[in-house]
Image (cartoon, coloured by chain):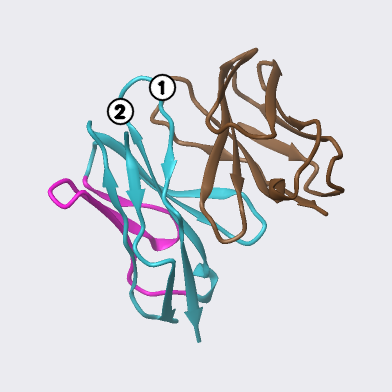
Chain colours: A brown, B cyan
Amino acid sequence: SQTIHQWPATLVQPVGSPLSLECTVEGTSNPNLYWYRQAAGRGLQLLFYSVGIGQISSEVPQNLSASRPQDRQFILSSKKLLLSDSGFYLCAWSVQGGSGELFFGEGSRLTVL
Amino acid sequence: AQSVTQLGSHVSVSEGALVLLRCNYSSSVPPYLFWYVQYPNQGLQLLLKYTSAATLVKGINGFEAEFKKSETSFHLTKPSAHMSDAAEYFCAVSENTGFQKLVFGTGTRLLVSP
């Protein structure tokens, strides 16, 4: 069966520090991969998605970047965090050519102080 | 482009009462529709999905939803609420063409009182 893991689960970082959140999927090949952010009291905002290694699409211009160095690995990064980057970050995957159904990781809570 | 509207950011019910969470969608082509549930500090879990088969879809935990094309709605219901149903619920739509990308509503928090 397929599983998705993301880490770290919780992160407290000072403004201006770098960020790296990692997500890996097991039990499937060639998945579509996604990063969402959920700010307090708000819905889910799609940040990035990827249909293959090295292929990244950005939905919103911002302080973050994403990379897909391997088929089932998706990384969210920032060189310098802002206060507004605080939130709950969710990685997800879907089957290529499927209905779009997303399978979510457990989430990473980022607090920028 | 597709979009989803969830009416009511908070819905309160008593234990044992009917749960009704509303979702209306906009899509230029036949949509796929989803309901997800999120418990505090967890990821989202799929409750049910509509992918152009039966219009009444049954999901986990006793939830069901009915696709009504004429009303562009996909409301979520459960006959009798449990305390464990307290969570946030998200409706989502993806269009049945090309790359499938889900668009989520802003969510509805369900509160269940004893």
Residue visible at 64% across and 13% down in the picture: A53
Residue A30 visible, this angle: no
Tell me, yes or no, whether the highlighted magenta stretch contains residue B91.
no
Disc 2 marks which residue? B96
B66 on left or right of A51:
left
Tell me the quadrant of the picture where the N terminus of chain B can be found. Answer: top left
Front-lying residue, A37 or B55: A37
Mark 1 belongs to chain: B
Q: CA distance from mark 1 to mark 2?
A: 8 Å
Instruction: Name the kind of residue labelled 2 in the image.
Output: Asn
Label 2: state its secondary structure: loop
Residue visible at 34% across and 63% down in the picture: B7
Front-lying residue, A28 or B34: B34
Tell me, yes or no, whether the highlighted magenta stretch contains residue B64.
yes
Front-lying residue, B78 or A13: A13
Residue B95 visible, this angle: yes
Disc 1 marks which residue? B99
Instruction: Name the kind of residue labelled 1 in the image.
Output: Phe
Near mark 1 (Cα within 10 A), the count class, few <14, some 14-19 or many ≥20, is: some
Specify the segment rendered in magenta: B55-82
Q: Residue A21's quadrant in the figure?
A: top right
Q: Residue A23's quadrant in the figure?
A: top right
Near mark 2 (Cα within 10 A), the count class, few <14, some 14-19 or many ≥20, is: many
Image: B112 above or below A54: below
